[in-house]
Image (cartoon, rainbow, N blue to C red):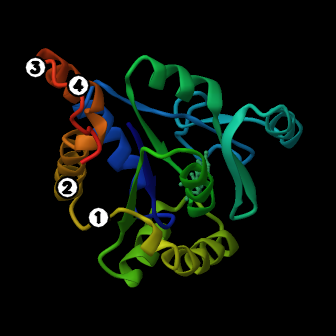
Amino acid sequence: MLIIISGPAGVGKGTLCQVLCRENPRLHYSVSLTTRSPRPGEQDGINYHFVNEDDFMAQRNGGQLLEWANVHGNYYGTPARLVEQLRKEGRDVILEIDTQGARQIRRNTNDGVFVFLLPPTMQDLLKRIHKRGADAPDAIKRRYANAFRELEELEKYNYLVVNEEIEAAVLNINAIITAEKCRVSRHRTLLKQLLEEGDIDDLSLHR
Ligand code: 5GP
């Protein structure tokens, strides 16, 4: 299963993904490529693969990115190879990406689960971006303005989770994962096996 988490800057996507991966050993966080500079405390290969623009473009032009976007003036992209390998192994992968990237994934895959994370209020979001203290004033303004633009994409997502308390948001996303795993469409092989046991050849599997 491919789980896509989007939402405005500062809403807490990073922390949420960390907790989710800690709680679900089968869930793998896809580390993105970015041309933005590391923030204090961020580690190369853990938070992002920090690359320069030439390296990023080389990977993009070589078709090595599953999706990519220019967000807040920097490039971000998902390395395709690891995601494809993990999915072949039957692992669940979580992508923390912006709405432009989500649009590309929606076009190219049919089993993505799209979750949009929202703050309780936009004022609360602004406070969180300030409190993070990681961005210069003009970057804060850009991120806050982009948040309103990103909200326009909300209708294209499957689920909305409000991140007021991290524990409650994690519970909601775990519930979404559980429900998605129970979808009939994800169990076609099992259904086929069960039907074959009864040797019923002509029963439609598409109901
Ligand atoms: P930040 O610079 O705050 O870490 O991330 C800025 C934005 O870029 C966030 O909305 C984040 O979800 C998005 N982002 C991070 N990695 C990727 C990626 O690989 N692809 C896309 N399209 N967006 C990403």
Give how far apart the Cα atoms at labels 1 and 2 are: 7 Å
Within-10-Å neighbours for mark 2: few <14, some 14–19, many 20+: some
Of marks 1 and 2, which one's residue comes earlier in the chain?
1
Q: Is residue 70 left or right of residue 123?
A: right
User: According to the image, label 2 marks what residue?
Assistant: 172
Q: Residue at x 24, y 68 (%)?
A: 164
**Label 1 with label 2: CB-CB less than 8 Å:** yes
Give how far apart the Cα atoms at labels 1 and 4 are: 43 Å
Give how far apart the Cα atoms at labels 4 and 2 are: 40 Å
Q: Determine the secondary structure under disc 1.
A: strand
Residue toward you, 50 or 23:
23
Within-10-Å neighbours for mark 4: few <14, some 14–19, many 20+: few
Front disc: 1 or 4: 4
**Label 4 with label 3: CB-CB less than 8 Å:** no
Front disc: 4 or 2: 4
The label shown at residue 201 is: 4
Front disc: 3 or 2: 3
Q: Is residue 161 left or right of residue 74?
A: left
User: According to the image, label 3 marks what residue?
Assistant: 198
- Determine whether 41 is above or below 115 in the image: above
Q: Amino acid at mark 2?
A: Asn
x and y percentages locating residue 61 in the rendered image: 86, 38
Give how far apart the Cα atoms at labels 4 and 3 are: 9 Å
